[in-house]
Amino acid sequence: MQKSKTRFWLFLFPALFFFCLVVIIPTIMGFYYAFTDWNGISDRVKFTGWKNFQIIFRDPTFLHSFGFTAVFAFFAVILVNLVAFFLALLVTRKFPGATALRGIFFMPNLIGGLLLGFTWQFIFTSIFSAIGEATGQKFLKGWLSTPETGFWGLLILTVWQLSGYMMIIYIAQLEQISDSVREAALMDGANGRQMLVHIILPLMMPAFTIGLFMTISNSFKMFDQNLALTDGGPYRSTEMLALNIYQSAFAENHFGVAQAKAIIFLIVVAAIGITQLILTKRKEVEM
Amino acid sequence: MEYSGMRQRRHTHEAILIVIGILLGLIFLFPILILALNSFKSQKGIFLDILGFPAGEFFSATNYTRAFELLNYVQSFLNSLLITVTSTFLILLVSSMAAWVLVRYKTKMSTAIFIFFAASMLVPFQCVMLPLVRFSFTLHLLNRFGLILMYIGFGCSMSIVMFHGFIKNIPEELEEAATLDGCNALQLFFIIVVPMLRTIMITVAIINVMWIWNDFLLPSLIINKPGWQTLPLKIYLFFGQFSKRWDLASAGLMLCIIPIVIFYLSCQKYIVSGITEGAIK
């Protein structure tokens, strides 16, 4: 079949054009701005070398947000995936209402992070304290007003939002484990626990890899929920990386510094993504 | 006797599953339900009886009418709808076109461009947002039109990757036969190829709709006129103004959540399978 070069470029052009306009050009500009004193307002931009990077590695808010995000991602990975796997095991059993439950567990994903953040702000500040009042539980009072409750608040919101999503991935994998494998294990006299540990868990490994990395990458990129739930408060103690970059630019007008932070952010996020790619590809080969 | 014993056990087993299921379902629904409940209470009602049912003097239906006005709901909703539908349509168009030629031309150039698109998915938004705003200002793109162009740029890489994976598995014979029959490139694509892409089109559309409808950060940087604001922008500004007024805020939040729930219930099947495919890809 005759294929012309013109056709190739003609069909590719619209996508390539918009892609270069909003992704490639700004990325290249971004690398340049990271080495300047750009303040977002003035048009005069001076090249300052590695100065911004020296600044951010001495910036306590940035280092704190980095650590906070990493610790958050660690807890989120464990909790989200544990809950998600449990939910998947539950709804793949046959009982009335199992399908409806899938729908309910999945729903929070579709509601935007901003709406969820505000909704949970209401739950943590108003509903929690009312329940605390009614039952005499002191720990339910003053949520989101301390760094610890802010951290757990963000974590609860994330588990609630993400576990339904990961559940869907685990369901897909669980349904691929064929009945004949389960029956063979039962014939050999495996009990429920043995079945889970020796049959189901090993066969679930590819899905766990996906769930693990998606949770890490989601935690690192989290912005809307952070902004709406705690806005980084109290005193920037619950500020995650994306929000820290945002504040550098729009609250402090240090656009050059914000851009340098964004470059570090890019390196971290890309490293996570590439590791995931390598691990999942290797798993596929093994299978 | 043994048989009935087993049946009995199966029944109690099922009952336990149902009880756990109902409890977990309620925990998951609780935040939305309690928000919905309080959206029908007056400010005094929320203050005095936040956990109770909205009844008697605590009941208030005016929260919704006031929130509706304050959010400028019809206009914000239509802005969100216009931006989401137009952007998604254009993303589908340009991405499927690009993915088709990227699959059918097996050259080094086409492989390189494809890898380029795929790799760009690793770039987080925070990395491009500041330069993007700066040159959008220069190019007069700080408006709804500019926003749609940006969604095409940001949405096309993931969409191309998904279309690419799908088209790869369609045999080329049909297209070759159509070419022999005298189809030109446009006819070939729109008459022969597009109808075969129906299922992947739905998947890609849903992923983009959910993302664009809920997106906050990009429109907050690009949209600078009140009349152009989308629902997420409006609700954010609304919260800045009425942060301690949970009577209005809860009704406002419900007004934003309800359309999403309706959309979910009406095409649940496509949404769940679409999002799953998008995640695993």
Image (cartoon, helix red, strand yellow):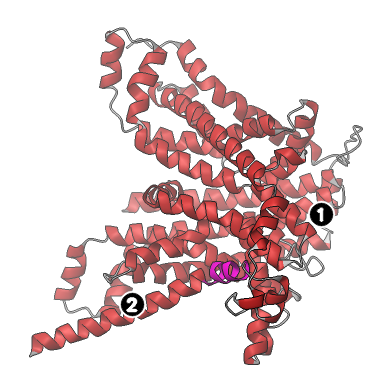
The verdict on residue A266 being magenta is: no
Q: Secondary structure at mark 2?
A: helix
- The residue tagged 1 is A56
- The vertical placement of A126 against A135, above or below, is above
Instruction: Decide which of A183, B77 is in the foreground and name it.
Output: B77
| Tag 2: amino acid | Ile
- The residue tagged 2 is B18
Specify the farthest residue to the front: B56
**Residue A245 — which label?**
none
The verdict on residue B34 being magenta is: yes
Q: Nearer the viewer, mark 2 or mark 1?
A: 2
Looking at the image, which residue is at 57% across and 34% down?
B87
- The vertical placement of B203 against B37, above or below, is above
Q: Secondary structure at mark 1?
A: helix
Q: Is residue A100 visible?
A: yes
Quadrant of the image for the C terminus of chain B?
top left
Tell me where the magenta segment starts and ends, as one range. B30-39
Instruction: Decide which of B217, A286 is in the foreground and name it.
Output: B217
> Badge 2: how crowded within 10 Å, few (<14), some, or many (20+)?
some
Quadrant of the image occupied by residue B53: bottom right
Image coords of residue A41 (percent x, y): 89, 38
Looking at the image, which residue is at 69% across and 89% down?
A138
Looking at the image, which residue is at 41% across and 25% down?
B100
Dominant secondary structure (helix, strand or loop) of the stretch shown in magenta: helix
> Badge 1: how crowded within 10 Å, few (<14), some, or many (20+)?
some
Is B233 on the left or on the right of B207, as rendered? right
Instruction: Decide which of B43, B145 is in the foreground and name it.
Output: B43
Image coords of residue B127 (percent x, y): 70, 43
Looking at the image, which residue is at 65% across and 79% down?
A128
